[in-house]
Amino acid sequence: MAIKVFVSAGTPADDTQMSFRDAIVNTIELVGFTPRLMSAKDWDYRNPLRGVRRAMDECEGAVVVAYPRYRIEAGRELRREGGDALNCAAFPTAWNQIEAAMAYEKGLPLLVVADTKLRREAMLDSANDIRPFWTDLDSAIGHSDEFLGYLQSWKQDVEQRAKAQPANTNVSLRDLTATQVLGVLPWYELMGVVGGLISALFAAATIGYRIGCGQWPFG
């Protein structure tokens, strides 16, 4: 089964962004992974973060594809000492930051691919233990040797994490014989099962005695 990787990408604003996102998704598939993007059915109406967490639980790595969602033509950063001017500043969807932080906290190998026009802060700041791959929005990114080098390094980390995960030990009781079921139970649970069987047998015998001919079924 192919390894799943979570992909954080905002809804494209134009064809350029869409082609860029699709190129990265296609490249992920080409290296043998299954991209896991959020769909409408994944969102939890009570708490959207629950839907993201459930999707990430299926994955062994994460990719953040960041491109502009907001552009500020003229503004200023608000700080006590006087913030910097924000002229033609661009910011990605807040979900890029949220999902990147969730993946990082979960310990998933994280690959961040970001448009060079974006403001470098939070998870897009190289000083915060993540080194994004900065690039123009070029749909030919899948042919870039530099990007493929980043991708290969991340791919190795994802594969190592997948190998380190314990095998799925969830086995249905219907697939086990009675001897196997009893064999995997701790002694105190086994005593409880035996006691329950004896009680059930005695209750059935008592009912049979009362509605029958006054004879115990054991006699």
Image (cartoon, rainbow, N blue to C red):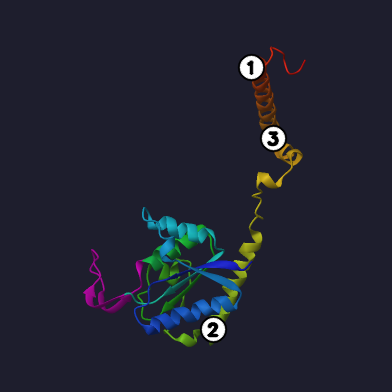
Residue 149 location (% of width, % of height): 57, 80
Residue 58 location (% of width, % of height): 54, 60
Spatial CA distance of label 1 from label 2 is: 84 Å
Q: Amino acid at mark 1?
A: Ile
Disc 2 secondary structure class:
helix
Q: Nearer the viewer, residue 38 or 88?
A: 38
Residue at screen point 66% across, 19% down:
208
Tag on residue 151? none
Q: Is residue 84 magenta?
A: yes
- What segment carries the magenta color? 70-94
Q: Which residue is mark 3?
A: 186
Disc 1 secondary structure class:
helix
Residue at screen point 40% across, 63% down:
98
Q: Is residue 209 above or below residue 95?
A: above
Disc 3 secondary structure class:
loop
- Location of the C terminus by quadrant is top right
| Corner quadrant of residue 205 | top right
Question: How many labels were placed on the picture?
Answer: 3
Q: Amino acid at mark 2?
A: Glu
Q: Is residue 12 left or right of residue 5?
A: left
Q: Amino acid at mark 3?
A: Pro
Q: Nearer the viewer, mark 2 or mark 3?
A: 3
Spatial CA distance of label 3 from label 1 is: 38 Å
Residue 21 location (% of width, % of height): 45, 78
Q: Which residue is mark 1?
A: 211
Q: Which residue is mark 2?
A: 146
